[in-house]
Amino acid sequence: MKIALCHDLPSGGALRMVACWAHHLSRSHSIDLFVLGSAERGFVDLGPSVGRTAVFDAPEPIRARPIVGPLGHLGFLRRLDRAYRTMAAAVDAGGYDVAFVHSCRLS
C-alpha cells in the first residue's frame, strides 16, 4: 500500500509514536512524508522509514501581543488553511491509497 504520512508535530511523545508507526508500516508499505516547515524533523529520524519528504511553507504563528485581535488570528488561520490545501493537493496528486494525517501544533 502507498501511504502519505502528514504531520506538524513538535518533539515529544506524539512524534515518537508516529516514528514507531512509520517504522512498522514501512516493512510492508511505501510511505512518503508530508510536513509543514514548522514540524520537528531532528527529534526522531523518519528517513529510514519514508521514501521521500515534502516540506511545505508554514505561516508564522502569531505571538501573544495586545495589538493582535481576532482579525490577526483569522489571517493566520487563512494562511494555515492555504498551506494545508497545498499539501492536500500534493497528496491527492501522488496517487496514495491512504493518507495518515496526524495532529497540527498550530491549530
Image (cartoon, rainbow, N blue to C red):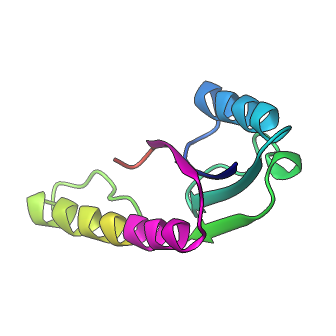
Q: Nearer the viewer, residue 43 or 72?
A: 43
> Which residue lies most toward the left here?
70
Residue 23 falls in image quadrant: top right
Q: How many marks?
A: 0
Q: Residue at x 65, y 49 (%)?
A: 40
Tell whether 32 sits left or right of 73.
right
Residues in magenta? 83-103
Tell whether 28 sits left or right of 59.
right
User: Where's residue 74, x and y in %?
Assistant: 17, 63
Q: Residue at x 59, y 58 (%)?
A: 35
Residue 85 appears anywhere in the view: yes
Q: Residue at x 54, y 65 (%)?
A: 91
Is residue 45 depicted above or below 70 in this figure? above
Tell whether 107 sits left or right of 3.
left
Tell whether 64 sits left or right of 96.
left
Q: Residue at x 67, y 56 (%)?
A: 33
User: Where's residue 48, x and y in %?
Assistant: 89, 48
Q: Is 15 a magenta residue?
A: no
User: Where's residue 47, x and y in %?
Assistant: 84, 52
Q: Nearer the viewer, residue 2 or 63?
A: 2
Residue 59 appears anywhere in the view: no
User: Where's residue 58, x and y in %?
Assistant: 47, 67
